[in-house]
Amino acid sequence: MSALFEARGISKSYISGKDELTVLNTIDLSINAGEMAAIVGASGSGKTTLLQILGTLASPTGGDLFFKGERLTEKNDGELAQFRNKSLGFIFQFHHLLPEFSALENVMMPALIAGKKKKDVIEPATELLKSVELDHRLDHRVAELSGGEQQRTALARALIMKPALLLADEPTGNLDSRAGNLVFNLLEQLCRERSLSVIMVTHNMELARRMDIIFRLNEQRIIRE
């Protein structure tokens, strides 16, 4: 089986004065359609930097990314923006919802940015909010939602364009255990139902062990546990 997404030899260094700081050194990882992978490691080990590179939000110093066999590292900024909008979903520790809009409007936003008509997006956005148990909160603004509800809204928003790969950076990190488990359970359920691939940075080893693959970052390198 060909990997859905693959990183080959990813490295990242920063120049500070005369010194060069290497954060990532020849990282290799791959994930198949429908798999869930956790990236774990100590604070400061480069997990978020790696996730940003995997999501084409940051450029590596060296190495290549491939999606369905297509090389991403040779695309220009416009092509990468289009790729992210159509093929990737993102969930961050801080939900980054737009406070002036309702939950429904926030979920619709990526599709509207992609040029879809509002009348064509309302129903799928509503269904997504229903799938994360928020159909009773459609018209509530961000400030009226609890932390767990905000993160579930962010999850629905990440799925509105039907991405093949979801990248999540500590999506349960700011939630209490009950809300965090609910968000993860919904993420896992949606992943299995939609054959959605997930790469998630987490400090929570209990959640990591529920995933198909664990990648551990240590001293700039990665191992598959």
Image (cartoon, grey):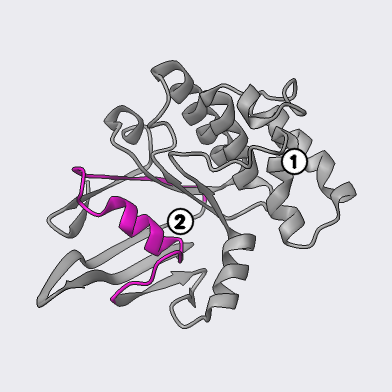
Mark 2 = which residue?
Answer: 32
**Amino acid type at mark 2:** Asn
Residue 109 lies within the magenta run: no
Label 1 crowd bin: few (<14), some (14–19), many (20+), radius 10 Å = many
User: Could you tell me residue 107's position as x and y percent?
Assistant: 69, 42
Q: Inspect the image, locate mark 1, and give the three-letter code of the amino acid beneath it.
A: Glu
- Furthest toward the right, the residue is 119
Q: Which residue is drawn at 77% across and 35% down?
A: 126
Occupied quadrant, residue 32 = bottom left
* Residue at mark 2 to residue at mark 1: CA–CA distance: 32 Å
Q: What stretch is highlighted in magenta?
A: 34-61
Which dot, 2 or 1, sits closer to the camera?
Answer: 1
User: Is residue 33 depicted above or below 212 in this figure?
Assistant: below
- Give the label on residue 105, or none: 1
Q: Is label 2 in a helix, a strand or a loop?
A: loop
Q: Which residue is drawn at 74% across and 24% down?
A: 135
Q: Is mark 1 on a helix, strand or loop?
A: helix
